[in-house]
Structures are given as C-alpha cells and as structure tokens.
Image: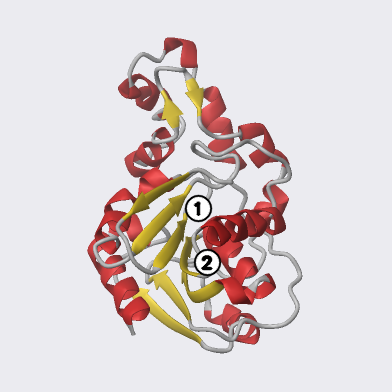
Amino acid sequence: MLNVVEYGAGAPLVIVHGLFGSARNWGVIAKRLGETRQVIAVDMRNHGFSDWAAPHDYPAMASDLAEVIDAYGGRADVIGHSMGGKAAMLLALTCPNVVNRLIVADIAPVAYAHTQTGMIDAMRAVDLARVETRGDADRQLAGIIEEAGVRAFLLQSLDVKAKRWRLNLDQLEADMPDIIGFPEASGAFEGPVFMLSGAASDYVLPAHRDTIKGLFPAARFAKIPGAGHWLHAEKPREFEAACRAFLDA
C-alpha cells in the first residue's frame, strides 16, 4: 500500500499530490482540513516514501488509491491535484462506489502536449556528491530553473542526508507519455465533482468542458483568482475554503 500521512478523525478524505510532489507538500492544508475529518495524504508510487514500481500509469495509480481507501472503510472523499487529479478521476470512473465527493484541482481528463522531462533532466544535473545542504542543491538548480518556487518544490523531494531523490526519475521519464495523457474511459461518474482551477492557469479550458461533463455530469466549476496551476500552494486559504464548502455541502 502507498505510504500515507494521517491527520484528524471522522469521515475519510484522501489527498493525492501531483507529479514530483508528495504528501508532505499538503501538510498545512491537510492539517487544517483534519480539524473536522480524517485526512489521508498519500505518497503516490515512485514518489516520497512509497514503493518504486512499474508501470507509472493511471490504471496502476487508481488501483493504488482504491487499496488505500479500502483500508479506511471502503469509501472516501478525494482531492487530487494535476497528476493526482487524473488518478482520482480514473478511480471515480472505474470504482465509483469508493468515491463519495471528488475535487479535481487544475487538471482535465485529457492529454496534454507539454512534457515534464525537463524537470527530470534538471534534477539529474544536480551533483549530489557536492550537496551538503538544501541550499547547495538550490544553487546548482538555479542555473537551470529560474523560478525559486519551482526549485523549492522539487527540493522537497531531495533527501540531503542520503544524497538521493525520493523520486523514481527513470520510471517517471519512461512513462511520461502516460502521465501527460489520459486513458480511454467509458461510462460516467454520477457523484458530486468540483473542478477547481487557478484563474491564471491554462490547464482547464472551455474546450475541455464537454469532455468533463460527459464523464462527470454533475461537475461544477470554479476558479481561484490570482492562482496558477499550483493553486493550493499559491492561495492555500482560498483553496481550503473552497474545498471545505464543497465537502460540507
């Protein structure tokens, strides 16, 4: 089963991070939501403290999530961001009885043209033998990645003491076409779905709405002003409030 971090008690809520992320990225929001429910933040396969395994595709990730939910009573609310949102959507479509309410953060059930192999190349370029502190790694990454926030996000997956990335970079690179894609899905999930996006992001477009509504007929849409793709990190209070309103409705 996936490595999980738990907060609070009550009705279960599973939080699923995006590519190169981990349960750790969601600590503040998970803790706050854990004030009124049991929150289970997962490390997806090939991320964090979970096992490294092939393949890294959405059927495998959805199966992992179903196993986690089974261990927590067999039914849960689910929040998924980016890659985690796609995994959560496929879970709802293939195992609808295990998902109560679904929040999809800034991703659509479609294939995207952009690849993230540049991030993998950047992490591989860090000479870990010369890294004694996170700052050492940041200075190396700065020559490749200008955005300090992106570097900080990636460095959360660096084990400085062990001089290794807590990411299976080889597997993620091999399965990048599956990660940026989305599998053919039949049927529909009839339960409540909240498509929450960043207003400054281009990941969920008006052109995607017919596809989304075809798979998730009850989907509702909202945007967080001033937020991009990393809406939960950029606007955590607004993100938490929007999620809480939907989950408590």
Q: Is residue 123 above or below residue 224?
A: above
Q: Residue at x 48, y 16 (%)?
A: 128
Quadrant for residue 14, please give it.
bottom left
| Residue type indicated by callout 2 | Ile
Distance CA(mark 1)–CA(mark 2)? 10 Å
**At which x and y percent is residue 130?**
43, 11
Other residues around mark 1 within 10 Å, as few (<14) / some (14–19) / many (≥20)? many
Residue in front for this viewpoint, 29 or 212: 29
Q: Mark yes or no: residue 226 visible.
A: no
Q: Are marks 1 and 2 in contact (CB under 8 Å)?
A: yes
* SS at mark 1 in the image: loop
Q: Residue at x 53, y 88 (%)?
A: 218
Q: Mark yes or no: residue 145 visible.
A: yes
Q: Is residue 214 above or below residue 177?
A: below
Other residues around mark 2 within 10 Å, as few (<14) / some (14–19) / many (≥20)? many
Q: Is residue 152 above or below residue 108?
A: above
User: Residue at label 1?
Assistant: 18
**At which x and y percent is residue 31?**
27, 55
Quadrant for residue 11, please give it.
bottom left
Q: Earlier in the sequence, mark 1 or mark 2?
A: 1
* SS at mark 2 in the image: loop
Indicate which disc residue 232 carries: none
| Residue type indicated by callout 1 | Gly
Q: Residue at x 39, y 41 (%)?
A: 153
